[in-house]
Amino acid sequence: MTQLSSVELLQAAADPVRWTVLDRLAHGTRCVCDLQEHVDVSPTLLSYHLRILRDAGLVTTARRGRWVDYSLAPDAQARLARAMPGVGVTAGDRTTLELVEA
Amino acid sequence: MTQLSSVELLQAAADPVRWTVLDRLAHGTRCVCDLQEHVDVSPTLLSYHLRILRDAGLVTTARRGRWVDYSLAPDAQARLARAMPGVGVTAGDRTTLELVEA
DNA sequence: CGGACGATTCAAATATGACTCAACTGTCGT
DNA sequence: ACGACAGTTGAGTCATATTTGAATCGTCCG
């Protein structure tokens, strides 16, 4: 997992299934079975997308009995924020809230 | 241009050429000929990628004589920030700088 | 006007990523 | 140990985004 580029990171997030998973994980740790209920794809396909998120280092996993729990990696939000084009330029000190509500 | 989803917006940014263009435009308005020097693809291909950014509403254009100037749309940064997964969750009031430097 | 320049469009070829299905691993309950 | 459950893996198929080359449009200059 050789430190991904900004583009590779954005590509990992720029998919309907993976975006939904990341968004759900932002609420906290979830087992695959929970994620499954939110995406309407086959278990196999979900697994495929989860592997991409794992490989990107955006999520971490922990087995709990039969289940596997997924969590957002601690630095996931920060790495994604840093991956946005024009970050070194705008930044200054605007809050994300300001950007979101602009 | 029917209001794009978060994923569609991220997909527009998640490409090496388009990311580079957006990043460069964050510095200010640039003609195609300037962008051309920063991407190492054929003029035809650059035009293809620029059209995708236009269709996404992330950039605007203005003809100036023989040249065409591209600018970041006023709300581009904000729309991209809003497109990040987990935005409604984290947000609070952390500065982008905090996220970037975490 | 005619040619050169900057940039875009079109149609066709290619490459990449998403998706499917069958087989597999690890864990629990009996 | 057996079978069911939760999830993953691997090898293919298919769709779509990317890429290419030829032709085109608008603008400037001699």
Image (cartoon, coloured by chain):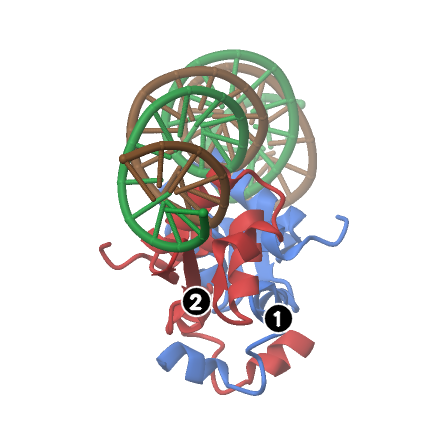
Chain colours: A red, B blue, C green, D brown
Image point 66% across, 68% down: which residue?
B75
Give the amino acid type for the residue marked by disc 2 in the picture. Answer: Leu
B21, B78: nearer the viewer: B78
Image point 50% across, 67% down: which residue?
B26
Asked if residue B44 is positioned above or below residue A85 in the image, the reply reads above
User: Do we see residue B36 in this rendering?
Assistant: no
Under tag 1, what secondary structure? helix
Packing grade of label 1 (10 A; few <14, some 14-19, many >=20) is: some
For the view shown, which residue lies furthest in the right direction? B2
The CA distance from mark 2 to mark 1 is 23 Å
Pick the quarter of the image with the N terminus of chain A: bottom left
| B54 to the left or right of B21 | right
Image point 58% across, 61% down: which residue?
B71
In the image, residue A10 lies at what x, y percent? 45, 56
Asked if residue B68 is positioned above or below residue B99 in the image, the reply reads above
- The numbered mark 1 sits on a residue in which chain? B
Under tag 2, what secondary structure? strand
Pick the quarter of the image with the C terminus of chain A: bottom right
In the image, residue A5 lies at what x, y percent? 33, 57
Give the amino acid type for the residue marked by disc 1 in the picture. Answer: Ala
Q: Quadrant of residue A7?
A: bottom left
A49, B43: nearer the viewer: A49
Identify the mark at residue A83; answer none if there is no mark. Answer: none
Whether label 2 touches label 1, CB < 8 Å: no
Packing grade of label 2 (10 A; few <14, some 14-19, many >=20) is: many
Residue holding disc 2? A72
D22, D14: nearer the viewer: D14
Identify the mark at residue B78; answer none if there is no mark. Answer: 1
For the view shown, which residue lies furthest in the left direction? A2
In the image, residue D3 lies at what x, y percent? 44, 33
Q: Are marks 2 and 1 on the same chain?
A: no
